[in-house]
Image: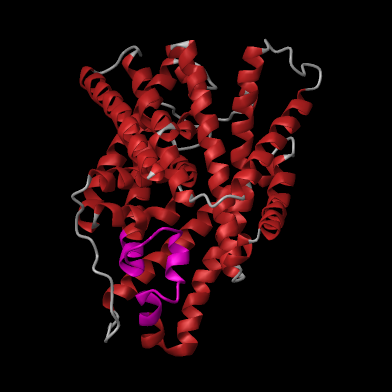
Amino acid sequence: MVKETQRNNTLAVKQAVFPMIGSILGSGVLTLPAAVEASGYLLSAPILIFVSGICAFTLYQLVHCAKELNTRSPSYFKVCQNTHPILGYISEVCIGIQGFGAITVYLLILKESILSLINMEDTVDYMPYNIMCSALLLIIPTVLAMQKSLKKLAFISVLSTISVIFLSFVVLLSGILALFLPKGSIPTDRLKAATNEPEGLFKALSGYIFGLGCQQNMVKVFSLLKNPTKINGAKVGTYAIVIVSIAYFFVANGGYIAGGNGQNSSILDVLSNTEKPFYKIIMTNFGDTWGKTYFHLITISKLAMVIVLLGAYPLQLHPTRDSIITFLSIIFKNNIFRNNPRILEVLITSIMTITVFIESLYKIKYISVMKLIASTASCYIMFTLPSIAYIYSQNKVKLFDYTSKFILIGSILFSICSTYLLLHKNNN
């Protein structure tokens, strides 16, 4: 955590928008086309606008509550704790669960991406090779995660943003090419216009929720503003959400147009699938040389995402580890490893890494993990907890108070229904 004396309010509103955008962009972009397939392309825009609007409003809720704290170093935990001490600890649990789910997703995507790059997807069916593969993949992120400080990995945030923008451009370009290039006699998928099943709507909502999560970072960015007013904080959050949502709309729909139906993995894997109509359309229109050159762009996008995930793993693991340590300190009243807290940090990191390693040996679909996180921890962090904090805050606007109550009730109902549908489907 940055010390209060080290915090310098140096960011203007426009400058603060970029770190917010960087905190939103991530691995969630890889499964956005699957959200469009779930809802249908006609409903993709209304659903995205709906989720984005609520996200922008809950960011304002956090800014309002952070301003009410009257401190130079507000945090998401302090905002929740100010409402009620128990709420602060609930926020730590949610952040911990979300973080642990995220590092699980990172490793699963990393494993799938690397195996597809070297054409060894079937190798992991043999358990010894599966164990060796997961162990080798965990070496670099584990070494990075064991560091006491991750300041040297700050460049990963910049690299992540650049990589996501690049792969988003490739996906969007693929959608444009798939839409306008001659198809000839190549059979193409019939794209879904709109779903009539509740499960499809919940799946689409989960996809966008996972992709837009950034609430725990809003308070920190707000504290770095030159003029940290509620209006300026609201502008930062709204601008970031609007920019990302516009990009997400084009990437999601472009990816669905290019990849078609059956998007059960990363859009990059879908686009590089030689059995898909998109591959045949590109090769037919571009020829062998230029066609292969185009698919090299997709390979480069995969490599960029691999590098990002290797760095994102430790960056996500540290706050998750800290949340666990916070709870242990409460249970043991700060008596556990008081003289050498570093031992506890290494121990927790090791336990988390071993757990993720064991999970990676099973055929777990990371899209299912994403949806489960979005339906539970992310939903509470993004909507439920900020709404509760605003409802019990001072100097609130009556209309916003009613809106917060609707969001609170809606988020709880969404979490229950979405989680039930997901678990019920997996059991069947």
Q: Residue furthest front?
A: 428
Examine the rendering and report whether any part of residue 264 can be seen.
Answer: yes
Q: Nearer the viewer, residue 293 or 3?
A: 293
Q: Which residues are magenta?
A: 253-281
Query: Where 321 sits versus 299, above or below?
Result: above
Location of residue 207 in the rendering, given as x and y in whole percent from the top left corner? 37, 47
Look at the image and tell me in which quarter the C terminus lies.
Answer: top left
**Would you say residue 269 sits in the magenta stretch?**
yes
Query: Where 41 sits versus 395, above or below?
Result: below
Query: Where 290 sits versus 234, above or below?
Result: below
- In the drawing, does residue 365 fall left or right of residue 56? right
Q: Residue furthest right?
A: 339
Location of residue 330 in the rendering, given as x and y in whole percent from the top left corner? 62, 13
Query: Where 165 sits versus 372, above or below?
Result: below
Residue 349 falls in image quadrant: top right
Examine the rendering and report whether any part of residue 9 can be seen.
Answer: no
Instruction: Name the residue at 28% across, 38% down.
Output: 53
Instruction: Name the residue at 30% across, 55% down.
Output: 36
Q: Nearer the viewer, residue 117 or 132?
A: 132
Instruction: Name the residue at 53% across, 20% down.
Output: 72
Residue 426 falls in image quadrant: top left
